[in-house]
Image (spheres, rainbow, N blue to C red):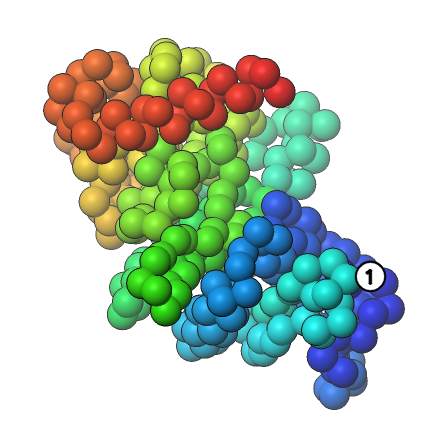
Amino acid sequence: MATNRTLLHRRYRVVSRIGAGGSGAVWLADDQRLPGRQCAVKEIVVPADLPEAETAVLRRSLHAEATTLARLDHPALPKVSDCFDGSPAAAAASGARHYLVMDFVPGRDLLAVLEEARRRDRQIDESELWSWAEALCEVLHYLHTQRPPVIHRDIKPSNIKLTPDGQLKLVDFGLALEVRTDDGSARTVATGAGTRAYQPLEQYGDGAALDARADIYSLGATLYHLLTGRAPASASERFIDPAVLADPRTLRPSARTALGSIAMACLALHPDDRPESIAAVRRLLRAGTPGGSATTAAESGAARSELPPTWWAELRRRPVRLALAAGLAVAAAVLSLMG
């Protein structure tokens, strides 16, 4: 495990920890090879129960994933510049680590911006929210149109940085890696697998078969939170009781745009009920322009603001898949009540 002043890979001198999650931590580090350059080093903890053979396969998968991320080139994404494994001595002492090095993005994340607005008893201006929504759609369209598509998996306000010059940067990808061993067995190991309030139902479990609509759900949850000041109810809570998700207009009656309706459309429990792509979300944004009424997009038929169908209707329509998801959702809800 890295600590302050640790030298990683004989190159990156750790300055401080700037983030942490279930899969590891993110460290601010000085690049000793390029004086004056600071970078963010994401430390990924390999599951302790992973057998040695699977650990080796996972290591190769992580390097392949890093190579994919390094090819990305968009102004709203930090550039990935290096990846490496932790030292064998450190692995023996505290478990295997894998490191991903990327540009350090200065500024505050949107959760911090939102919390500051709350402390001042203010709300973020809708015109600013609209421009953020358009910027996020632009970078997600770039990711989803790669070949193969790149799914972020962990979109939420704390993973979106607002730089000092007012630009948005989408940081901290979640990784989902399939580990296959010589005997043919396979399982998916997820890192940065998402936060419940922003996580679609299909991402519960290992989330191996996600597509772009998972990011669309997380985008909707993020817009909902930024607009209303309240994180949405989780998918597991909504599956049990759809009414637990409040209409954004009841939480922010002064809203003048269709942003709340667009967020609700993205938050549909089943992927098939969401906009089919980020391009479709961008069309909704164009239909409900800033300054328009809160029902502009809905009246044009471009978005749905009603609450999701009840659980039994969903089960009748898609019995097998939704039954499996229901089991995971109910289990998660029970555990949250117990904990």
In the foreground, 24 or 320? 320
The quarter of the image holding the C terminus is top right
Q: Nearer the viewer, residue 222 or 14?
A: 14
Q: How many marks?
A: 1
Q: Quadrant of the N terminus?
A: bottom right
- The reply to whether residue 151 is visible in this rendering is no
- Residue sitting at 47 percent across and 73 percent down? 60
**Is 101 placed above or below 313 here?**
below
In x, y percent, where is residue 234?
45, 26
> Could you tell me which secondary element the residue under label 1 belongs to?
loop
Vertical relation: 197 (above or below) 334: below
Q: Looking at the image, which residue is at 71% across and 28% down?
A: 120
Type of residue at label 1? Thr
Q: Residue furthest front?
A: 183
Where is residue 102, by image quadrant? bottom right
Instruction: Tell me what residue is drawn at x 74 percent, y 87 percent.
Output: 33
In depth, the one of 70 and 110 nearer the eye is 70
Residue 13, compared with residue 267, is above or below; it is: below
Where is residue 105 shown, x and y percent of the image? 64, 63
Residue 9 in the image: above or below residue 189: below
Specify whether residue 129 is in view.
yes
Q: Left or right: 74 with respect to 274?
A: right
Please state if 13 lies on the left or on the right of 52 as rendered: right
Q: Is residue 68 left or right of residue 110?
A: left
The structure residue drawn at horizontal position 61% and vertical position 67%, both measured from the top left corner, is 98
Residue farthest toward the right in the current orientation of the protein = 5
Return the x and y of residue 99 as percentages of the image width and height: 62, 68
Q: Nearer the viewer, residue 96 or 30?
A: 96
Query: On the image, numbered disc 1 is attached to which residue?
Result: 3
